[in-house]
Image (cartoon, helix red, strand yellow):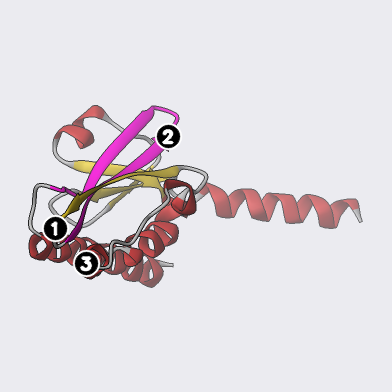
Amino acid sequence: MRIRITLLFLLITNLSIGQKKYVMLDRAYNKPALYTDSITKENIKIGYYPIFANQLDSLLEIVSTFRKLGKQGLSRTYFNNEDYKTSSINLQISNSHHAYGDVYDIDIISITQQGEYRLKLSDASQSSHFTDSYIRNFYDYIKRTIKTRNKSK
C-alpha cells in the first residue's frame, strides 16, 4: 500500500514539474504566448501580460462574456465585478451612461506573487465598434493560445 502511494506521489510530482506556471500573453496579439516559470521585467517591458497557466480557460470564459459589449451597452447591461472573480483574476468594471446606451471601462487584473498586472479590455473613450473588434481579437488570440497548448500536450 505504501509503495502504491509513493509511486502515485512521484508520478504526480513529475507531471507537475513539466508544466509551466505562467502564460505570458502578448498585449498586441502578434507574438505567440510564452509559457514560463517566472515573470521577468523584460517580458513585461516588451508587452507581455502574465496570468497563471491554469487560469487561461477561465480568462477565455470571462472575455467571451464581453464579445458583444456594444449591444450590451445599448441595453444598459450592468456587470458586477464579483461575478467574474477567480482565484487570480479580478475585473474592474465601471460604466458611463450616455444618451444611446452605456459605455464601459473594463480592466482585467492578474494577481501573481510578483504583483498585479492590468490589461485594459474596454475603454469608455473608444467607440463601441472599436471595442467590440478589440475584444473579439483578444478572444481569438486566447482561443489560438489554448489550441496550441492542447496540441502540445
**Left or right of 124 in this view: 13:** right
Q: Quadrant of residue 61?
A: bottom left
Query: In terms of sequence position, does the residue under pointer 1 or pointer 3 come before the other?
Result: 3
From the image, tell me which residue sits under label 1.
Answer: 99
Whether tag 1 and tag 2 are in contact, CB under 8 A, the answer is no
Kindly state the secondary structure of the residue where label 1 is placed: loop
Vertically, is 133 above or below 59? below
Magenta segment boundaries in residue numbering: 101-124
From the image, tell me which residue sits under label 3.
Answer: 74
| Residue name at image x 28 percent, y 31 percent | 40
Vertically, is 10 above or below 132? above
Residue 119 lies in the magenta stretch: yes
| Residue name at image x 12 percent, y 62 percent | 128
| Residue name at image x 22 percent, y 43 percent | 48
Q: Amino acid at mark 1?
A: Ala
Q: Amino acid at mark 3?
A: Leu
Kindly state the secondary structure of the residue where label 2 is placed: strand
Vertically, is 6 above or below 64? above
On residue 59, the disc is none
For marks 1 and 3, give the one nearer the viewer.
Answer: 1
Vertically, is 143 above or below 42? below
Q: Amino acid at mark 2?
A: Thr
How many residues crowd mark 2 within 10 Å: few (<14), some (14–19), many (20+)? Answer: some
From the image, tell me which residue sits under label 2.
Answer: 112
Secondary structure predominantly adopted by residues drawn in magenta: strand
**Left or right of 13 in this view: 50:** left
Query: In terms of sequence position, does the residue under pointer 1 or pointer 2 come before the other?
Result: 1
Whole-Å distance between the Cαs marked 1 and 2? 39 Å
Q: Position of residue 51 (x, y in %)?
A: 37, 45
Whole-Å distance between the Cαs marked 1 and 3? 9 Å
